[in-house]
Image (spheres, rainbow, N blue to C red):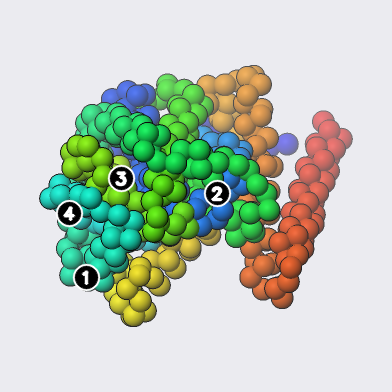
Amino acid sequence: MPEKNGGYSKVASSSSAQTSSLQKMHGVWSSRWTFILAATGSAVGLGNIWKFPYIAGENGGGAFVLVYLVCIAMIGIPVMCAEVLIGRRGRMSPINSMRFVTEEAGLHGAWTAIGWGGVVAGLMIMAFYSVVAGWALHHVIETASGAFTGIDGAGAGAKFGEFLGNTKSLIAWHTVFSVITFTVVAAGVTKGLSVVARVLMPFLFVALAVLLVYAIVKGDIAQGFAFLFDFKFDKLTGKGVLVALGHAFFTLSLGMGAIMAYGAYMPAHANVAGTVVTIGILDTLVALVAGLAIFPIVFASPGLQPSAGPGLMFVSLPVAFGNMPLGIVFGTLFFVLVVVAAWSSAVSLIEPGVAWVTEKGKFNRTIATGILTFIAWLGGLLCIYSNNWSGDKEGHFFVFEGLDFLTAQLMLPLGGMFIAIFVGWFMNKKILASEMDAEGHPLFDIWLFLIRYVSPALVALVMVFTLYITFAEPSDDLDFRALMFGLKVVSGGLSIVIGLQLWKLRKAKAQA
Ligand code: PHE
């Protein structure tokens, strides 16, 4: 049988001078650790500190957290390896890296849609991300000025509601955040970001630990802990499963090319699997500690609800800081760090697009960054104005919620699923093993199995499930019916795939 994937020799001969000059264009991280810090900077962000606690709260806590952890381990980490691998193999923007590996595998150019979809998803996420990061910036000033001193749950809730009704202020903070993101991306992430990540990430960990201690001493830690870790399945809804799956992608920055773009700047001989597992563990720890810091405070404060929604962090933490010794100092420091965490994530949201525009050669990096930041900024304005269209000042953002749903729950999981299918089924196994530096290692086979079968099947299952509950007649056992339907569709699909594989194998054997 002819070698479909070409392998190294074909690559070397077919890579044009133009490709190789593009591959040298963006620079390389100075070491494996810089890559870890930068990728952790991308992963750890508002998703961990703001989003995880509130979606866990909205979806009943424990069982949701368990599904989320399973998704991180079974889907997130394997897909992250796949993304790093494609990036490092292609060494260009996600669009061009996808084109490179697609050509290398002799496949149809449609696969580059993974790169395109990622650029669009990144801008869509950046639109609402930057608005929320603006809220955090606003909280830096509020906390520092002592506005929260002595405040209670009801007071903090009212104050935040008032802020959300103030369009001018929302736009101003959103703009400040867009500008600081622009600055780092324009400077080039391999230069700009590493210093930020190296110095400030460790501070974030310390600040979270301080908050955790406060929550243990002053909050209701037992109830907070039970809320997050009592895996009660009756609380788990179909929607909760979808949200957990989507969040696993969101929190690890997967499915849209951010990690692929960073992987493109990775030194050639850094160990992929170890690096990715480190990033996954750090990211998960930050989310869990954030939850353990926030919920005890929520439970100990009358007027606060775990299911408060997007305002949860912006309301519960001011109560904590407003009532703790040195709260002004710790509170200010904390929100500064939230901004920094958001900042280092936002950079990776527009990097894939910027890298691609720069490679086109028409604009320099600064202008490319300006264009993409501006598009995302406009999206942010839509988010802000949609709050006022709804006439509901309590933080109901149509566009905001729509973008969040479309990206986190559809585009990222689907992007991740196609990345897994591409790497698992279409890339040359020899190339994979050598890029992973794992020839003959048993973990390599486990990884391959996960990205071939488990990750795509689980994402497909959740997608079918969601489609079913969206269109079926509601009833008591809707979730169960949807699950059964999803299982049938996905196991049918898997049987066809496995059948075809066996058939191909037999044919190949017969020919040999
Ligand atoms: N991972 C980031 C967070 O948790 C968000 C993000 C998603 C960044 C996708 C880049 C790409 O906040």
Q: Which quadrant is home to the C terminus? A: top right
Q: Which numbered disc, 2 or 1, marks the residue closer to the eye?
A: 2
Residue 340: name its quadrant.
Answer: top left
Mark 1 nearby-residue class (10 Å; few <14, some 14–19, many ≥20): few
Q: Pointer 4 and pointer 1: residues touching (CB < 8 Å)?
A: no
Say which quarter of the image contains residue 264: top left
- Amino acid found under the numbered disc labelled 2: Gly
**Position of 248 relative to 380 (above/below):** above
Residue wearing tag 2: 61
List the residue tagged with mark 1: 166
Q: Is the residue at mark 2 in contact range of ligand 1, meaning its CB lies under 8 Å from it?
A: no
Residue found at x 56% / y 30%: 432
Image point 73% across, 36% down: which residue?
1
Contact? badges 2 and 4 (CB < 8 Å) = no
Dot label at residue 395: none
Q: Position of residue 45 (x, y in %)?
A: 35, 44
Is the Cβ of the residue at disc 2 closer than 8 Å to that at disc 3? no
Q: Secondary structure at mark 4?
A: loop
Q: Earlier in the sequence, mark 4 or mark 1?
A: 4
